[in-house]
Amino acid sequence: MSGSGEKKAVVTRFAPSPTGFLHIGGARTALFNWLFAQHHGGRYLLRIEDTDRVRSTQPAIDAILDGLGWLGLTSDEEPVYQFARAERHAEVAREMLANGHAYKCFATPEELAELREAQRAAKQPMRYDGRWRDRDPAEAPEGAPYVIRLKAEREGETVIEDSVQGRVVVRNAELDDMILLRSDGTPTYMLAVVVDDHDMGVTHVIRGDDHLNNAFRQLGIYRSMGWEEPVYAHIPLIHGADGAKLSKRHGALGVDAYRDEMGMLPEAIINYLLRLGWGHGDEEIITRDRAIELFDLAGVGRSPARFDLKKLENLNGHYIREADDARLARLVIPHIVTLIGRDLSDAEKAVLTEAMPALKPRAKTLNEIADGALFLVAQRPLAYDDKARALLDDAGITLIAACIEALDGLETWSTSTIEEKIRGVAETAGLGLGKVAQPLRAALTGRTTSPGIFDVLVLLGKGETMARLSDAAASDVGQ
């Protein structure tokens, strides 16, 4: 503990179990811990709780580290791996045994099963009855296996002044003597968490409110060891738009899915997760620096936040429009490669960057940009969809032929010179510009939607434009 009333530096931690991907709810917990530490000039740490040796996997650890790295929520120090600290956890259990705050329990699995059955029949809460709490271990058969249990307080109540939930009180009679060390000598999760938080110097435990009940039991270990207790902040879980607990059908996917499959930007995910259960006035668009400036636990609501994929997409669209074009092009390339099944040439990559101002204004995801950019990397002869084919009837082909003639002699290939020529074709035909642009778009992209038609022509360049128009004019596409 710090002396002379000195204020301790803030230390937070994110402690995922590597039994699967980095869930979107876990990412929000990491964000809140990171922001709180940043706001107070403290440290944010990562602990991998890999004590479940059956379900914990290296690919899951890699996915968690990768997801946190993508979101910019990397730990200020090397990650702590809980399993590697098992001997330290056991040492604390033995110290509690020695100081009288824990005891050996020799109850057999059969005895405990009978106890649970009797409690169930009597409609009583199922908890250990403390039968070895005050007995002499010498009464047990020689060499009998035992667990080490916490000697929990039985009188009075335990109070937590939670920074999110407020004052929460539990009667100590409701807390049982939980196991600290199993009969095989391995520590339980409840013991490991407390020892690790203490040894890592964690001052603020910010986690989901599904851990609130654990906090009351874990405090027994802090108090038995005479350790300084952390400040608790239990944040409500995330629900789907329908109010039900968040699941895959609501979008409860791994962070990697939002990046790789859904085409989200990390800054959009961060902004959205920040506003999911935390707020500052009416601000919706909040940059990372602004979030660090504003974030506090008082702004976290007590009610479950509702996940809304449409809102996330709209926010992603905002950040796409704000993004640097070269960066955006780099991020879009893998999505295009997935669609077309081949790598892009250097020339195609350069055009893609050039095309971003035309492609990004209406896009909400990188997938939508990739889809909109397909005309740039399409290879002749183009495949036309049904709507495009319908526009390339005899009337459409006649307009295409007129465009070829008007554009053929152009020496300066620019938006203004192209527009002048195409408007001339429309006036000669007695049509509005849109009536000419429609078959032109169909011939150049194979579709009826694209960026502005003049942007399409400029981006394709004169050679490719004329070749595609000639293909359309010479074919019987609309027949």
Image (cartoon, rainbow, N blue to C red):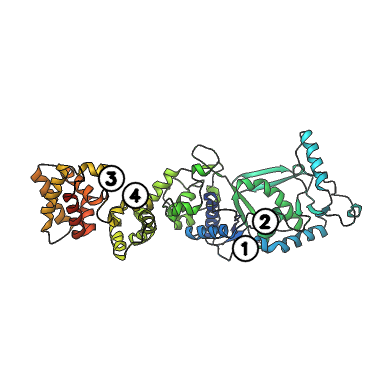
> Marks 3 and 4, how far apart in space?
21 Å
Q: Amino acid at mark 1?
A: Val
Looking at the image, is mark 1 or mark 4 earlier in the sequence?
A: 1
Which of the numbered marks, if any, corresponds to residue 385?
A: 3
Q: Mark 1 touching mark 4, by CB under 8 A?
A: no
Residue 228 in view in this figure: no
Q: Mark 3 touching mark 4, by CB under 8 A?
A: no
Q: Position of residue 406 (x, y in %)?
A: 11, 53
Q: Which residue is mark 1?
A: 80
> Marks 2 and 1, how far apart in space?
12 Å
SS for dot 3 = loop
Looking at the image, is mark 3 or mark 4 earlier in the sequence?
A: 4
Which of the numbered marks, if any, corresponds to residue 363?
A: 4
Q: Residues within 10 Å of mark 1 (few under 14, many from 20)?
A: some
Q: Position of residue 363 (x, y in %)?
A: 34, 49
Q: Position of residue 346 (x, y in %)?
A: 31, 65
Q: Amino acid at mark 2?
A: Val
Q: Which residue is mark 2?
A: 193
Q: Amino acid at mark 3?
A: Asp
> Marks 1 and 3, how far apart in space?
54 Å
Q: Residue furthest top?
A: 122
